[in-house]
Image (spheres, helix red, strand yellow):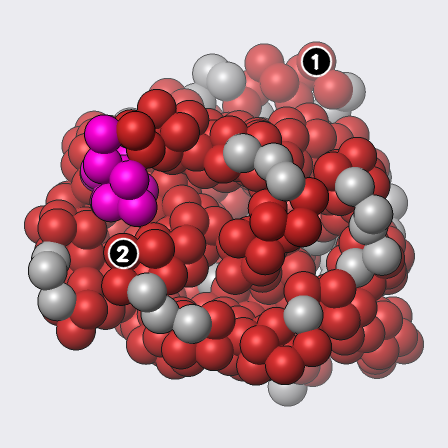
Amino acid sequence: MKRYWTLLLLMLVYSLSLLDRSVIGLLLDSIKTDMQVSDTVMGLITGFGFALLYGISGIPMAWWADHANRRNIISGGLVVFSLATSLTGFAQNIWHLLLGRMALALGESTQLAPSIAILADLFQKRVRARAMAVFSMGPPIGIIFGMTSAGWLHLHYGWRTTLLVLGIPGLLLALVLRFTTTEPVRGAAETNPVAADKANFLETIGFLFGQKCFWLIMLSSALNAWPLFVTTVWGPAFLGRVYQLDAATIGFYLGTVYGIAGLLGAFTSGFVSDYLGRQEEKRKLYYPTFASILIFPAGLLFLLSDSVGLAVIGIALVSFLASSPMGPTWAIVQSITRLRMRSTASAFLQLMTNLIGLGLGPLSVGLMNDRLAATYGAESIRYSMLLIPVVSLVAGILLFIATRYIKQDIARAAAA
């Protein structure tokens, strides 16, 4: 029962992490107006600037977590990024906003990779995908409750108060995590446990990048991050500019329809993937491969519809499908790496996901918005976001190719 309590708390930490970094999308136009900056600048600060520091700092944080108490690292980072969220509400200019995002990035870089490694030590391989899928329900839960609350707070009290309030729950959760959970024994959930040897950093890098499946999953995950990050950063602006919806209505759509769809997508993927992978581990990737490819038509429905109703259905489908690959791919990565490399492996996955998905995704849309604005006006965002379905199609193809190498990479990890 204790492992499920740990899973619940880590899922909530992940929920707050995603909410605190993504709520800026809901507040984007108000901040842009207050600070008188362009879409490109906002895309750079909310996307690439955050992702670069978040991804790079995640590597040393994960290396630390592979050799220290992961629970303490996660709870300490939660305090940092929660304070950063609240203090960003006091930003007086774009440089203050940038500093707040940098502090947020540093705090959040302690969270994902160590959490995944802890769960791999708590849940055996046969149920690991569903445990990872439950964990990956964190972001949609954050969207459901956080975006709805943020939309209401923004409408009635403005963006500054919204950020101040949203940072408070994380401070309380940090105390609960620190004092009600324990650090699990590394490799405790393995059927045939091997020694948790402490490879040095260069040995770790050499091993990880010798795993073909790891490369392919890392690239696919980076591309699959586009739909989630671009829709959470620019989705609110899209609904506001194209359909003239107010912040509360946008918060409702993103917090309920988009959030619940993502929750269902994450939950479903783990159980389906574990079922498909009962006989062969590679079959766990069949479902996320199929989901990635289906984002193509779902993205077109979301972006090219003339009706707000159809657009909401489209974004719900994108959310459902884009949330599906995370749990199964995280589970596979834990299976193809050695015990003292698990956090570091997840950190490299996180680095690529954030540089390409969170970094280049929102920045590319911001650049294209500014470039197309003279021709298409408010509609420019519609065409800028068409990159979403294209990259997801490529991600699906990469995942399918990765299935060819899973068996040999698992054997190499076990023999190392």
* Residue at (24% x, 45% y) in the render: 379
Residue where numbered disc 2 is placed: 242
Q: Is residue 242 above or below residue 269?
A: above
Residue 258 vs residue 23: left or right?
left
- Find disc 1 in the rendering and name its residue: 202
Where does residue 404 sit, x and y in percent of width and height? 22, 30
Which residue sits at x=77%, y=20%? 200
Q: What stretch is highlighted in magenta?
A: 375-387
Instruction: Evaluate whether residue 217 shows in this view.
Output: no
Q: Which of 172 and 413 is in front in this view?
A: 172
Left or right of residue 255: residue 279: left
**85 above or below 221?**
below
Residue at 59% over, 56% down: 30
Q: Residue 146: where, in percent of width, then height?
A: 57, 75
Looking at the picture, how far across and down is residue 330, in whole percent? 46, 48
Position of 16 with respect to 133 (left or right) is right
Residue type highlighted by circle 2: Val
